[in-house]
Amino acid sequence: MFCPPLTITFLGTGTSGGVPMIACDCEVCESIDEKDQRFRSSILVESDTTTIVIDTTPDFRSQMLNAKVKKLDAVLFTHPHKDHVAGLDDIKAFNYFRQQPLDVYANDLTQLALKKEFSYIFEVNKYPGVPEINLHTIDNAPFVVGDIPVIPIYVWHLKMPVLGFRFGNFTYITDANRIDVSEMQKIMGSDILVLNALRKEKHISHFTLSEAIEKVNELKIPNAYFTHISHQLGKHEAVKKELPKGIQLAHDGLVIKTK
């Protein structure tokens, strides 16, 4: 299916603790460079008629205000970790102004966590003003939100399956340290890939900077942006100078457009 041109806004590019990290006095956390200040990882995907958010982080309210989002059609969840789901309650503002439930897309694993963490959303007799959602189950099958076609991509976060998403020639993957060959086929041909690159040192469940670079080269993607960044990676401007041509560090507020 044809995918219209999209505007992608990076709402957050940090790891679970955010940057600066609470109580840390390292040079990154004390940096005055705005590009070293990172909310938890999330993106906004917009066509002329449809607006999607990937994950509702603990920073969701601030992210929506910073990006001046007035209309939201759907939330797509990657996985159930707290730094990716904790802000779900704040979608109730969109319910209030839309006067209708919001479409939420998640796999079975994430739905279990949502029903546990936000049990009040799913009660039969709800307290007035709680979020209203239409919950849709994602599997391997492509689906469409408004006029935006979505291809789910399963990757591995240690032993947890995490969903990436391809929209036309743009692919977004976070919280991964392994991608199966069959799923890599879904990514190939993308013009733009967003991929997690936590730090330089080895990590049990995230790609390191060198591993992320290697994966971009293996997939032959011409334009890549790294996200889910820890303060341990280093200062934005210093790391930027180390990256190969065609690869950049994403930063909060960065906007890119697809064709």
Image (cartoon, rainbow, N blue to C red):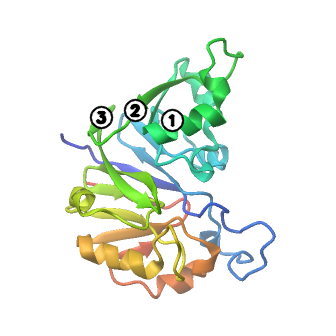
Quarter of the image where the C terminus is located:
bottom left
Q: Which label was assigned to residue 137?
A: 2
Is 67 in front, or is 233? 233
The answer to which of marks 1 and 2 sits earlier in the sequence is 1
Q: Which label was assigned to residue 56?
A: none
Q: Residue furthest top?
A: 125
| Callout 2 secondary element | strand
Find out whether the residues at labels 1 and 2 contact each other: C-beta distance under 8 Å. yes
Locate residue 142 relative to residue 21 in the image: left or right.
Answer: left
- Residue 204 location in percent, x, y? 52, 71
- Residue 170 location in percent, x, y? 31, 56
In the picture of the structure, the residue carrying the numbered disc 3 is 144
Up-down relation of residue 138 to residue 35 (above or below): above
Give amino acid for label 2.
Thr
Is 71 in front, or is 166? 166
Give amino acid for label 1.
Gln
Up-down relation of residue 69 to residue 6 (above or below): above
In the picture of the structure, the residue carrying the numbered disc 1 is 111
Up-down relation of residue 76 to residue 195 (above or below): above
